Amino acid sequence: MADIGCGHGAPLILLARAYPASTFVGVDHHVPSDEAARGAAAQAGVSDRLTFEVADADAGKR
């Protein structure tokens, strides 16, 4: 599952805890939020199946 505009990733962390056989990706444009989400996932023990990426809405436009 992917969450676009994931912020600090709280919903994804809850999902990763509830569904341990699944993987999740969070994407946000805000670097500090991405860093906070990675830290929260590591603290929750779900960083092995939850990743966060930084991207903006203009990525890939020509």
Image (cartoon, rainbow, N blue to C red):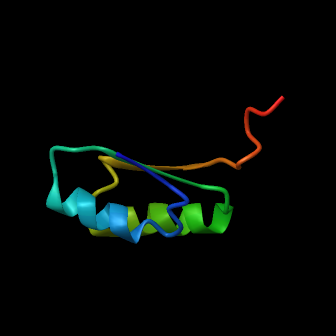
Considering every residue shown, the one lying at the far front of the view is 62
Camera-side residue of 28 and 38: 28
Q: Is residue 55 left or right of residue 7?
A: right
Give the image location of residue 31, x and y in percent: 66, 61
Q: Is residue 49 left or right of residue 51?
A: left
Give the residue drawn at x 26%, y 67%. Answer: 14
Q: Is residue 13 left or right of residue 35?
A: left
Give the residue drawn at x 34%, y 54%. Answer: 47
Considering every residue shown, the one lying at the far right of the view is 62
Give the image location of residue 13, x and y in percent: 32, 64
Give the residue drawn at x 22%, y 44%. Answer: 22
Q: Is residue 6 left or right of residue 12?
A: right
Give the residue drawn at x 71%, y 48%. Answer: 57
Q: Is residue 60 above or below residue 31?
A: above
Give the image location of residue 54, x and y in percent: 62, 50
Considering every residue shown, the one lying at the far top of the view is 62
Residue 43 seen in render: yes
- Quarter of the image for the C terminus: give it: top right
Q: Quadrant of residue 9?
A: bottom left
Residue 45 seen in render: no
- Quarter of the image for the N terminus: give it: top left
The image shows a total of numbered marks equal to: 0
